[in-house]
Image (cartoon, grey):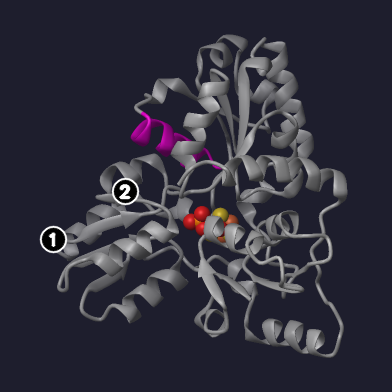
Amino acid sequence: VLGHHYQRDEVIQFADVTGDSFKLAREAAARPDAEFIVFCGVHFMAESADILTAPEQKVILPDLAAGCSMADMARLAQVEDAWDVLADAGVADRTVPVTYMNSSADIKAFCGKHDGVVCTSSNAKSVLDWALKRGDKVLFLPDQHLGRNTAVLQMGMSLDDCVVYDPHQYNGGLTAEELQAATMILWKGHCSVHGRFTEQAVDDVRARIPGVNVLVHPECQHEVVLKSDFIGSTEFIIKTIQQAEPGSKWAVGTELNLVKRLAHDHPDKEVVFLEQHVCYCATMNRIDLPHLVWALENLAQGHVVNQITVDPETEHYARAALQRMLDLPG
Ligand code: 13P
Ligand code: SF4
């Protein structure tokens, strides 16, 4: 039973392994003896687990409605159209497609087919370094914020090096000249949870809690990240709070189940949720105890329910993109 950190307490208590999406992908790949993997997370994570495990291993998602609004913002047909736009601008052969783990298997396969790669919030910088050794541009899917924050804050690029490709506009809303001048072509997608943290929330919490440290996930908007003190993946956020001095104060901008758990597990530190107007990730929360119990009871009776399978061709190319990521050092 693999559990993402954004899962409810009632579910996470039964996970054999907890982790962010990177750690869970590795953990799935490292368990060739597990006949069944019950994935307490969202659909794209279960797909990745299926891709990285052997054909006889079965991956189960306790509720099929546990999708991800960000992953849904990049559809294969839209990405193929975008690639044609890049080809018309004369830049496709110099562009490496990079997709965030939070994308469907067919988008990962698209990247695999075009010599691209997958990244997660824990390794976006090393993946972009890898990609920019192989091309002089990156098409970054589907989270514009992770792409922009990594490029500007970790790789020394400027905002002018980034353009936003909007799949709902003609030619992405960009001219050939804009595409030719850009290094980062950011897909216009975002997380409907992290994208809602605001600059105002950072100002408010600093006024309310003097000396507070603001710690946010890189899926947050660039302006919010600029006002924060620390930025990092879910695993980074957990480690930072674990290692913080007793008595220190933290406002955390990530999914609410995790922030509540951090506050509960660290009573010697003050840990608060950054924003008043952000709620749980609705799709992560679809996995509740009744769904987990239902999936496990069926398994105990020999019925495999809600199996997630990726077709062999998609799996082949998606695995290539995932494997390139897993092979990077670190
Ligand atoms: P990580 O698990 O990579 O931190 O991603 C956060 C997230 O939003 C997962 O859906
Ligand atoms: Fe998707 Fe955001 Fe929910 Fe993660 S937190 S599953 S990126 S909507």
Magenta segment, prevailing SS (helix, strand or loop): helix
Q: Where is residue 289 in the image (x, y as percent from the top left)?
A: 63, 85
Q: Can residue 153 be seen in this view?
A: yes
Quick one: 275 or 152, which is closer to the camera?
Answer: 152
Q: Is residue 153 above or below residue 170?
A: below
Quick one: 7 or 239, which is closer to the camera?
Answer: 239
Location of mark 1 (residue): 211
Q: Please, what is the three-letter code of the amino acid marked with disc 2?
A: Glu
User: Alpha carbon of mark 1 to alpha carbon of mark 2: how far?
Assistant: 17 Å
Task: Name which residue lies at 39% across and 26% down.
Answer: 159
Q: Can residue 193 be seen in this view?
A: no
| Beta carbon at label 2 within 8 Å of ligand 2 | no
Tell which residue pokes out farthest to the front in this image. Answer: 33
Q: First in sequence: mark 1 or mark 2?
A: 2
Task: Name which residue lies at 26% across and 56% down.
Answer: 214
Q: Quadrant of residue 208?
A: bottom left
Q: Is mark 1 on a helix, strand or loop?
A: loop
Tell whether 237 sits left or right of 134.
left
Return the mark for residue 199. Answer: 2
Residues in magenta, as a range: 143-155
